[in-house]
Amino acid sequence: MKLTLVILIGITSAPAHAATPRIGHDELRALQLNKAAFELVDVRMPSDFAKGHIQNARNVPQGEIGTGVWPREHHVIVYCTEDPCPMSDRAAERLAGLGYPKVSILAEGFAVWAQKGYPVVIPKQADKPRPGRLPLEAVKERLEKGDLTVLDVRPAAEFAAGHLKGAKNLPLEGMSTQAAALPKDRDVLVYDRTSIRSRQAAVLLLEDGHKVYEMPGGLMGWTKKKYPLEMN
């Protein structure tokens, strides 16, 4: 009788993605106190961010994380309300895929940070000026007059595919550093594909002393009316 010997070898495959490193609250607080070079990104929705966020955090919702631009050499720390959280996990994976070499997630998230009594910023919305609102028809009329500074806060690729007449592309991530160079004797219109990022840009411009308007419906509303676009 001929016997065939079969040897089974167990192979343990490595996970496709290594787990994203966690950083503790005490370690993050030490980075803040030592004024280290790092980027802190709150990946929650703007409505949650507005209710309270970590000092010096920037709000870039998880679905828009690819639009953020930070120095590649900086440590990027993302956080959500709790940990684990699908939004912070996906954001961290996306950043790693974009080539950021050091990405971490805040262990236990924002809720525990606040419980520990570490600095939390809670904007006083009632005390802040609010942007005006220009209906689409009014925007079209004022574009023809040429009496608006128009800022498109979308990424450059989206801007090149079509934008409002005379618009300047100033993505949200560069707004805080470039707002001071904009003339303050002209009304400013900010717009995005919808309204999430344009509202954040409008707040930054208001804080810098500009008279700012939003366009209800954003660029999606504009194109639904078949109003004209320029292309680069």
Image (cartoon, rainbow, N blue to C red):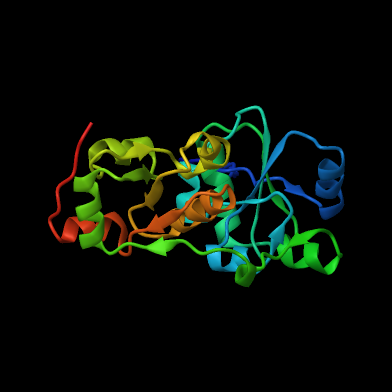
Residue 74: percent from left, percent from top: 67, 32
Q: Camera-side residue: 32 or 129?
A: 129
Q: Is residue 45 visible?
A: no
Residue 190: percent from left, percent from top: 39, 51
Residue at (22% x, 46% y) in the render:
145
Residue 19 drawn above or below residue 99: below
Residue at (56% x, 38% y) in the render:
96
Residue at (48% x, 44% y) in the render:
172
Task: From the viewer's perspective, tell me whether residue 158 is left or right of residue 95.
Answer: left
Task: From the viewer's perspective, tell me whether residue 224 is left or right of residue 95.
Answer: left
Which quadrant would the C terminus be assigned to in this image? top left
Q: Is residue 134 visible?
A: yes
Residue at (80% x, 47% y) in the render:
28
- Find the residue positioned furthest to the bottom: 126
Residue 60: percent from left, percent from top: 54, 52
Residue 123: percent from left, percent from top: 67, 64
Q: Camera-side residue: 7 or 153?
A: 153
Task: From the viewer's perspective, tell me whether residue 191 is left or right of residue 17.
Answer: left
Task: From the viewer's perspective, tell me whether residue 153 is left or right of residue 38.
Answer: left
